[in-house]
């Protein structure tokens, strides 16, 4: 498919030369003709992309006729503005569409003020006015033919001389389709991507909720401790022992000298001394009234598998270099995911240049 981009004003070759001195570009009939001649044989499709504010009437009609004479299927897309004579070029396509935020403007043709730099008699002005009315009716005829819209409605819109949105343009028949944004379609409310995001967001929210609850619980614990200490200092209460007991797998009891609800940790004061296997498989080692080691069930299994030196058999114990390092602390980890904390220009209106009359 050959692609024709109409992004500049529609200008004759003579006007393009003037624009060139001002470092401005334009699209002429000659440009379109060369484009069509360069289409490979057998390619029967033309894609017309428009972001154009219009231009000269005669040049625009020549482009329309040239495009339609190819017999190829023409698909047009409004990518931004489509104003004035560009709307006539748009209607050369049989299939017309636009992006949601594109704009379209139709209006009556006129002579730009910079072209009226001559002397005109009454007959000259009347001739110019008649020419403008002819062009206006010609455009209206083409609009009605290609869109199927009511002539009076289109004429009223031309008189208003204002941009309309794509929903209105679709109602009038200037386009048949409004192209949805690809990113919106890919991430719609029912898409797999959206579902995955919702799931991840739910997990993060749950984690944040857990973290909030833990923080509130810790705050309350600190407050209770502070109030208890204040009560003791004021002599309102006798000091209470701060500890709790844990039952071992064998039914014995060990005492942990810290507030109830706080997990035992290496360095805590505790009693009695010895290795105490707990119902969850962990082993708490207490020496000289302090917890010196907390091993989980996997650590115990590794220790049990190590060869031991026997006083009677003289078996050798594996050296440290031959064994897998064993974690010596029981650490409770809580992982909480953090909160994933163009130049606008005035439309170049449909233009028709007056012809200098012989004096």
Image: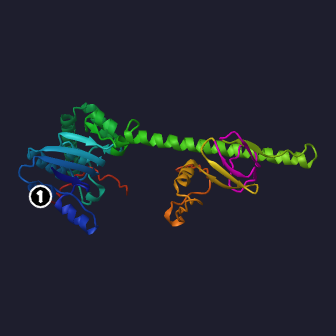
Which residue lies most toward the front here? 312
Is residue 83 something that shows in the picture? no
- Our reading of the magenta stretch's main secondary structure is loop
| Residue range highlighted in magenta | 249-278
Which residue lies most toward the bottom here? 21
Residue at 20% of width from left, 40% of height from top? 95
Quarter of the image for the C terminus: give it: bottom left
Which residue lies most toward the left here? 41
**Residue 51 falls inside the magenta stretch:** no
Q: Which of 150 and 50 is in front in this view?
A: 50
Residue at 21% of width from left, 65% of height from top? 17
Q: Nearer the viewer, residue 145 or 225?
A: 225
Which residue corresponds to mark 1? 34
Where's residue 148, x and y in %? 21, 32
**Left or right: 197 as drawn, with respect to 178:** right
- Secondary structure of residue under mark 1: helix
**Way the structure is coloured:** rainbow
Where's residue 232, x and y in %? 89, 47
Q: Nearer the viewer, residue 207 or 313?
A: 313
**Left or right: 116 as drawn, with respect to 70:** right
Where's residue 83, x and y in %? 29, 47
Residue at 35% of width from left, 55% of height from top? 345
**Residue 275 falls inside the magenta stretch:** yes
Residue at 88% of width from left, 46% of height from top? 239
Compared to residue 8, the image places residue 256 above or below, namely above
Where's residue 23, x and y in %? 28, 67
């Amino acid at each position: 498919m050959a692609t024709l981009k109409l992004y500049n004003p529609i200008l004759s070759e003579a006007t393009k030369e003037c624009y060139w001195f001002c470092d401005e570009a334009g699209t002429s009939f000659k440009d379109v003709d060369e484009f069509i001649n360069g289409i490979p044989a057998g390619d029967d499709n033309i894609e017309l992309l428009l972001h154009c504010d219009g231009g000269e009437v005669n040049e625009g009609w020549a482009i329309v006729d040239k495009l339609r004479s190819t017999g190829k299927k023409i698909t047009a897309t409004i990518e931004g503005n489509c104003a004035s004579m560009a709307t006539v070029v748009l209607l050369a396509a049989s299939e017309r569409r636009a992006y949601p935020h594109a704009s379209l403007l139709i209006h009556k043709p006129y002579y730009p003020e910079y072209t009226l730099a001559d002397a005109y008699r009454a007959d000259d002005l009347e001739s110019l006015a008649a020419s403008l009315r002819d062009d206006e009716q010609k455009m209206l005829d083409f609009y009605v033919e290609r869109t199927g819209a009511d002539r009076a409605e289109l004429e009223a819109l031309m008189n208003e001389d204002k941009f309309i949105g794509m929903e209105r343009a679709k109602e009038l028949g200037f386009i048949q389709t409004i192209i949805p944004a690809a990113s919106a379609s890919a991430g719609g409310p029912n898409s797999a991507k959206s579902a995955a995001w919702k799931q991840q967001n739910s997990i993060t929210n749950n984690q944040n909720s857990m973290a909030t609850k833990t923080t509130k619980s810790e705050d309350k614990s600190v407050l209770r401790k502070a109030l208890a200490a204040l009560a003791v200092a004021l002599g309102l209460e006798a000091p209470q022992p701060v500890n709790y007991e844990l039952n071992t797998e064998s039914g014995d009891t060990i005492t942990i000298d810290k507030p109830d609800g706080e997990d035992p940790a290496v360095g805590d004061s505790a009693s009695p001394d010895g290795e105490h296997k707990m119902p969850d498989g962990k082993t708490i080692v207490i020496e000289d009234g302090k917890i010196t080691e907390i091993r989980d069930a996997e650590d115990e299994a590794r220790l049990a598998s190590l060869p031991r030196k026997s006083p009677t058999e003289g078996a050798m114990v594996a050296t440290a270099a031959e064994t897998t390092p064993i974690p010596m602390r029981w650490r409770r980890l809580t992982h909480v995911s953090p909160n994933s904390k163009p130049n606008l220009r005035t439309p170049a209106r449909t233009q028709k240049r007056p012809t200098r009359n012989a004096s």
